[in-house]
Image: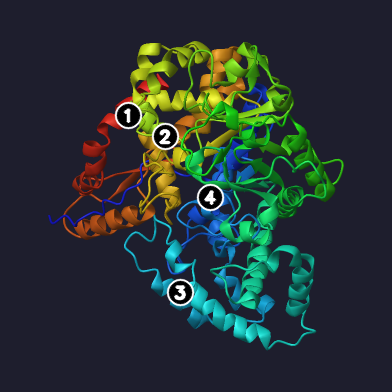
């Protein structure tokens, strides 16, 4: 008997069946409600890192694309998030602190949309294919190619120039031209700034119009699924904006950590409505409020106690700190309400107060300072220890309201959860091993055996579960997929920093991460919370459903393509004197094929599992014990 080669592209873990999704969703929502996770559940997902379908891969993802929104729809079922948080929206140039504060990056332009009637087909299908073909790196499915999209020499930019030429020839009374003219009129205060890298002002306005419309389409796609879009309001302004509004800035001074080299607004005049500093910050905040449903205020501690260092300074010094109290934060909230309306919930503005002790502290004599009270503070559990960095610590050690903070295992900046779980030293934090301080408090909070949390998989699962106990939480996509790479590598010259993408076969990638154990299995988190709080005893029926679905997501399943390979081989073998297949179902959702002739074939199909994933299966068995 000749056994054909079986594909090793197997997926261990499976997606929910259509007839399971409704019950799964119901179970998640009931479990979260009982656990207290009833506020914002934030999925930090850079739009540029969204997956792209093979054959439509231009280099970066789009929320306005079918591929992007299909992915969001898929993961929403498994994560039950109601907020998607993006990274800063300016043109990406090595890092986000080089980006403009007002202009959107060309990464928001979806060239595919320009081939449609809505945009008068100002881009041809052939030109779209030129952009796609130019993205020819071997890593194109997993690493964003900004060079193909951004900059005057990028393929997309050159193709957009052709689209602009056609656009200029359209009838001034056309719907597209009317929308464009309205956009230009409403945004002329920042569109007309002289920009060193954008010498053609009319072409720049055209690109900003497209980026604004396509961002809005992405937001509409999210809103239609009950998801709010959160924008990241970065602390910086770029050099073009400094030159255009010189009186808004304190000459030759930087704000924040001196090595960031971010030009500082003039905080001596910023409270004066007539000052350029006041007007410029207002314009930045209100533009973001128009574009997004929620706002993340980056490095918000610099609006409370800004560190304003002279050029050449490398350290944070006390004499360079300026106390602003909550005066600037109140202005930000006022400006947002002017756009959103007086009934806008200020809990939809979240503030990054997380900083080193030498940079900023929220406490005075052990008490929370006034600017930090009653505002939603963003914290990760990277540095979780007995009295810090957990939902438990913030509620019981500091007596914060569950409404005034959001917590998660991490975001785009710190060490990835998987590295922490494996006890890898943090090269960006004095080579500290963060896991060591986290084990005992996690064991106490979740009523787990501390020794068991030395297992990296069990530690990662515990970190996910602890964050799930908070009313408001957040999860970064790299952690959700169990990735070990650091998204922000915090070093110059990196070819991957801020560039990791979700692959086009994201379903398999997510399922594999669950089976391996480092991916985010929301049912596993709920199971741990229920056991810790005794809900498994008081709500046994709901608990049973949670455990059932947790185990379903850990199931091993051969993909359909592999099944067909096996089937074809079995049929060939069966044409000789071998026993014909006899199907047997051990469970309603898991078919098993048993045949005398197919036994060897199936052995080949599962060889990869037996060798590579044997240890993982043992780990998962321990988890269900």
The answer to whether mark 2 and mark 1 are in CB contact below 8 A is: yes
Residue 370 is left or right of residue 233, and the answer is right
On the image, which quarter does residue 21 sit in?
A: top right
3D distance between C-alphas at marks 3 and 1: 40 Å
SS assignment at label 3 = helix
Of pointers 2 and 1, the one earlier in the residue sequence: 2
Which of disc 2 and disc 3 is earlier in sequence? 3
Which image quarter is the N terminus in? bottom left
Q: Which mark is residue 331?
A: none
| Gap in angstroms between the C-alphas marked 1 and 4 | 28 Å
- Residue 401: horizontal and vertical position, in percent? 71, 20
Q: Earlier in the sequence, mark 1 or mark 4?
A: 4
Q: Position of residue 202 (x, y in %)?
A: 65, 77
The residue indicated by pointer 1 is 424
Taking the image as shown, residue 590 lies to the left or right of residue 619, namely right
Q: Quadrant of the C terminus?
A: top left
* Mark 3 / mark 1, whichever is N-terminal: 3
Under circle 4, the secondary element is helix
Q: Which residue is mark 3?
A: 155
| Residue at the right extreme, as displayed | 342
Q: Is residue 499 or residue 532 the one in the foreground?
A: 499
Residue indicated by mark 4: 97
């Amino acid at each position: 008997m000749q056994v054909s080669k079986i594909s090793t592209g197997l997926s261990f873990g499976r997606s929910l069946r259509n007839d399971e999704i409704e019950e799964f969703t119901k179970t998640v929502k009931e479990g979260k409600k009982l656990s207290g996770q009833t506020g914002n559940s934030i999925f930090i997902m850079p739009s540029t890192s969204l997956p792209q379908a093979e054959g439509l891969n231009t280099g970066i993802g789009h929320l306005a694309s079918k591929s992007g929104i299909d992915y969001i729809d898929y993961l929403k079922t498994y994560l039950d998030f109601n907020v998607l948080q993006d990274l800063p929206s300016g043109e990406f140039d090595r890092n986000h602190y080089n980006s403009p504060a007002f202009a959107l990056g060309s990464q928001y332009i979806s060239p595919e949309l320009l081939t449609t009637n809505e945009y008068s087909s100002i881009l041809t299908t052939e030109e779209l294919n030129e952009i796609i073909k130019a993205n020819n790196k071997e890593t194109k499915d997993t690493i964003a190619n900004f060079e193909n999209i951004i900059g005057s020499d990028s393929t997309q930019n050159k193709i957009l120039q052709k689209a602009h030429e056609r656009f200029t020839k359209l009838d001034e009374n056309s719907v597209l031209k009317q929308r464009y003219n309205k956009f230009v009129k409403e945004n002329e205060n920042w569109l007309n700034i002289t920009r060193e890298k954008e010498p053609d002002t009319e072409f720049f306005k055209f690109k900003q119009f497209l980026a604004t419309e396509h961002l809005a389409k992405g937001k509409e796609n999210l809103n239609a699924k009950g998801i709010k879009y959160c924008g990241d309001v970065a602390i910086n302004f770029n050099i073009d904006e400094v030159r255009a509004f010189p009186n808004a800035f304190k000459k030759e001074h930087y704000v924040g950590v001196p090595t960031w080299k971010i030009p500082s607004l003039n905080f001596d005049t910023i409270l004066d409505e007539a000052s350029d500093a006041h007007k410029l910050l207002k314009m930045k905040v209100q533009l973001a409020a128009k574009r997004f449903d929620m706002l993340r205020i980056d490095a918000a501690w610099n609006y409370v106690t800004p560190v304003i260092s002279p050029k050449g300074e490398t350290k944070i010094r006390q004499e360079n700190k300026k106390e602003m109290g909550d005066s600037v934060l109140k202005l930000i909230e006022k400006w947002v309400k002017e756009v959103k309306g007086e009934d806008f919930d200020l809990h939809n503005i979240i503030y990054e107060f997380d900083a080193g002790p030498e940079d900023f502290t929220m406490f005075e004599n052990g008490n929370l300072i006034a600017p930090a009270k009653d505002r939603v503070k963003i914290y990760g559990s990277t540095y979780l220890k007995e009295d810090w960095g957990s939902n438990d610590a913030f509620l019981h050690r500091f007596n914060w309201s569950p409404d005034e903070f959001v917590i998660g295992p991490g975001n785009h900046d710190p060490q990835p959860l998987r590295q922490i779980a494996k006890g890898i030293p943090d090269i960006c934090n004095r080579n500290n091993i963060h896991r060591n301080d986290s084990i005992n408090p996690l064991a106490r909070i979740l009523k787990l055996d501390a020794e068991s949390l030395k297992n990296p998989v069990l530690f990662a699962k515990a970190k996910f579960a602890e964050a799930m106990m908070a009313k408001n939480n957040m999860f970064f996509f790299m952690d959700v997929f169990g990735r070990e790479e650091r998204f922000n590598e915090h070093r110059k010259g990196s070819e991957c920093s801020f560039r990791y993408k979700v692959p086009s076969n994201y379903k398999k990638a997510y399922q594999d991460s669950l089976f391996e154990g480092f991916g985010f299995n929301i049912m596993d988190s709920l199971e741990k919370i229920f056991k810790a709080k005794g809900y498994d005893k008081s709500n046994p029926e709901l608990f049973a459903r949670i455990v059932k679905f947790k185990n379903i997501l850990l199931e091993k399943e051969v993909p359909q393509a592999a099944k067909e390979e096996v089937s074809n081989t079995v049929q060939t073998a069966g044409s000789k004197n071998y026993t014909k297949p006899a199907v047997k179902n051990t469970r309603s959702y898991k078919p098993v094929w048993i045949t005398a002739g197919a036994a060897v074939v199936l052995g080949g199909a599962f060889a990869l599992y037996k060798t590579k994933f044997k240890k993982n299966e043992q780990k998962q068995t321990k988890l269900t014990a």
